[in-house]
Amino acid sequence: MSTEPLRSTRSTCPYCGVGCGVLIKSRGEQIVGVEGDPEHPANFGRLCTKGSTLHLTARAEVQQQLRLLQPMQRLERGGAAQPLAWEPALGLASQRLAEIWQRHGPDAIGVYVSGQLLTEDYYVFNKLVKGLLGSNHIDTNSRLCMSSAVAGYKATLGADAPPCSYEDLALAQTVLITGSNMAWAHPVLFARLEEARRANPQQKWIVVDPRRTETAERADLHLQLLPGSDVALMHGMLHLMLWESLIDRRYIEQHTSGFEALRDRVREWTPQAAARATGCREDDIVTAARWFAASPASLSLYCQGLNQSSSGTDKNIALINLHLATGQIGKPGAGPFSLTGQPNAMGGREVGGLANLLSAHRDLARPQDRAEVAALWGLPDVPATPGRTAVEMFQAAADGEVKALWIACTNPAQSLPDQAMVRRALERAEFVLVQESFANTATAQWADLLLPATTWGEKDGTVTNSERRISRVRAAVAAPGQARHDWAMAVDIAQRLARQIGPASLTPEQRVAMFDYPDAQSIWEEHRASTQGRDLDITGLSYELLEQVGPQQWPMAQGQTQGRARLYEDGVFPTADGRARFVDIAPRPLAETRRAAFPFSLNTGRLRDQWHGMSRTGTLGRLLGHTSQPMVELHPQDMARLRLVDGDEVGLSSGRGQVVLSAKGNAAVAPAQAFVPMHWGSESLIGRTADGRLHGGINELTTPVFCPKSKQPELKHTAIRVEKLNLSWRLMARVWLPGRAVLALRQQLMQMLAQDDFKSLVMASVLPFGREEADADSAGGDVGDRGSSGLVLRAAASQPLPLKTLAPIAALLGLDGPALLAYEDAPHAQQRRLLLDAGGQRLRGYWLAGDTSGHELLDSLVLEATPLPGAARLLLAPGALRQRWLQAAPRSAQICTCLDVNEARIRAVLLKSEGQPEQRLQALQTQLRCGTECGSCLPRLRTLVAEIAPEAGAAAAAAVAL
């Protein structure tokens, strides 16, 4: 172990928009730990499962196996990338971009960046495209998560400015959560909300969601509406408010405009009509309307369920209409509060990082705004035509109009809808430039030039969270290898481009000087100056002040000592007349409605312990304990109708492609609906489309149709067909491996399974499992040790794979050779192998090819490291394996990721625990310690406390299998 002193660096979590403060622990140039920052006002020391394991994603093993550590050039598409020195790499990037600009014009270059970039990164990219290239063709993956919220705020309140603060969670009397599974997507905020309700038991929660999520389980009222019917629901609520005189007429008259047209619109939307349109009970709609309108303070919290829709802006507007009609805005505990999906989607919007925006919330459509930005940058003008947004940009590349794609810190080959179209775009583009931290992303495989970027723990700058709070991001360690900051790479390329192309009114030297930024702070100060007099004025803020007093909310103009916690308290809005605007909108149908050919509604969403495309969280087996494999969830009635049992493979088809997944019954999903997490892309899921091509994961299915106002695609709904696949040949393997080899082996396996030898595979996944620990893995992680990790391989094929074809796969996993117990039937492609420990008493790995029945028992034996139930050779016989499995209890689902506590152990304690719910929860925490670390499992624990009544005597508890 290193003798260097332990350092602590204040920074910010790189995941969701909650913006939690973290303390990074490091020794030398190695991050060794992370804690929540108890002084950060976003989280006060709390972290979720993802944030609390950040240090494990920075282990040396991850750096060595997955990080992109030097520039790489691909000489031909599909070929291996070759190392390249920085100078020729930058020269190549600028030369290719300049050639395309000169031959085809500025509109032939599309720049696609990320809500995970820092504000300083964003600012340089925005200036480079709109100031130097002379185009607005820069967009961000924030288009996929927040643009409908932006458009909704601007249409009604006049500016993209969430009016609330996290402190309003404790001040609200009624909380309406819609389109958000907060318990999983924003667990730290959800923990604050649960704490608020415990302090104020009168606080009521209304949850609107097509699924009965963990958030909905905790609600006082769950409105399980039909997908896409949000506007009808809110119109029905407003109708009831009008009928029962629950609106605030004084507020409407003094602070708003446009109410009459909306009033006339909702006249036909009685609660009865809304119930027919939404599938909700009429009485529940009435109750929700009364609770919201009559409450002293009503707060709404919303996210992708409203945003990711072809009518996403309208859904946001309909919700804000409710706030304006009842005066539930601009006061403590009240207001429409959009929950940001990414760590710096707000910061990107602040600098104008979307195709239709300019710096400091300026609008491209306003000549005065364009003139102000041009003056700031020393240009005669900036382009007036809005640029191509995310989907439009890639569609234009697929059509041959965009010739170059410059992609930074995002993974469109996993996250964009209609992956077939995205593949065409990446194939047809003449030049694809990718700035990335991880070499294994799906998009990196398409890059002509890869530039290595710094990531969490190495970056320096600022981010803005959901409540408009600006926090510092600080580097704890130096950048590994040759990695550079994103802003620095953009500056280097911009200065080289500036010598060749750019506004003709400026000399090359003047163009180069536009990007004279020695450090991140100099960029931020230019951004700060651009905000003077704007709604987000931060001229009173500085890096020094952030160092001295900590994170601050905007606006914070010069002379002010702190930011503003709440907006619009005076009832004055940033519109031409100072009034908020009601917007008359009509409910619109989904982009794709269910029909005979595609009778299911597909809903995509998040897992509790995973993030986006899993390029970081997917490196940790412990974060795959809660949900361990790609699956589609269906209602039990649909499972029965399709004659499915858990684990059966099904084909999910839309008008764009097909994906094969295992099915799982879950009553939380409504009939005729299906749920699949958004995370499963080609990095973790392999399969073939109908024409034999490798597919792009779940977004092979989703529609590129977007909201006409926000240009945000309808990722939350796709009409699909679900078909049972009668596959008789499967492959299952699980084995502990040294931590230093797991991730590299996984990459090798995924690449091998994608080869033509495995064309008959309709589905395959390779994922890590285990309990990674920084110290254990740094030392190598002995196989079988509980601090080590391993790989689990699952596959299914339309026809048996020859055993000789499988041999290299087994060899990579160490599941071959004479030391294993083995059975083989080559003519029928049946093979079973067991890897035992030195004493022959415990199972370290297994391999089942052909008949995989009973693999659940083998999983339990490998994962739990329990002694074998009998002679090991008996596990080789399929019949005996099945019989032993039927006699054994299935392995219980993991609930607590931090401490690996499963549901069976929790049930056993609860059956013996009496008293009030909080006392029983405390008994759980005392005996099992679950819920005492990050707290992400607490919502589920509270649900189990409510569900499981104590039984008399210890006998019943003892009968529960642990």
Image (cartoon, helix red, strand yellow):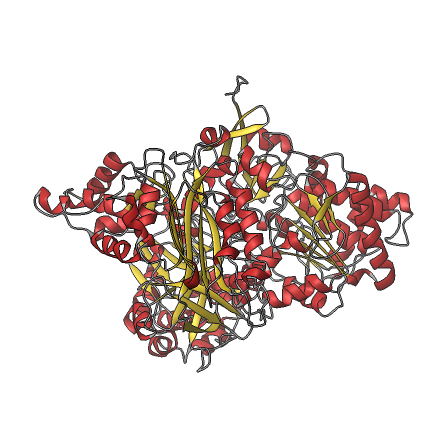
Of residues 356 and 73, the one drawn nearer to the viewer in this rendering:
73
Looking at the image, which is closer to me, 618 or 217? 618
Q: Quadrant of the C terminus?
A: top left
Residue 307 percent across, percent down from the top left? 51, 62
Q: Residue at x 41, y 71 (%)?
A: 725
Is residue 415 in view from this perspective?
Answer: yes
**Which residue extends farthest bottom?**
596
Quarter of image, res 273 = bottom left
Image: 283 above or below 19: below
Tell me: residue 559, above or below residue 575: above
Q: Position of residue 190 (x, y in %)?
A: 39, 48
Q: Is residue 154 left or right of residue 299?
A: right
The residue closer to the viewer here, 360 or 139, is 139
Residue 667, image x, y percentages: 30, 64
Count of labels shown? 0
**Relative to the observer, which residue lies in front, 800 or 502?**
800
Please give left or right for residue 236 compared with residue 361 in the image.
left
Residue sticking out furthest to the left: 953
Which residue is drawn at the image coordinates 55% and 62% (left, top)?
Answer: 148
65 horizontally vs 325: left or right:
right
Q: Residue at x 30, y 61 (%)?
A: 221
* Rendered position, 786 above or below 829: above
Residue 678 pos. (x, y %): 49, 58
**Residue found farthest to the top:** 3
Q: Is residue 679 visible?
A: no
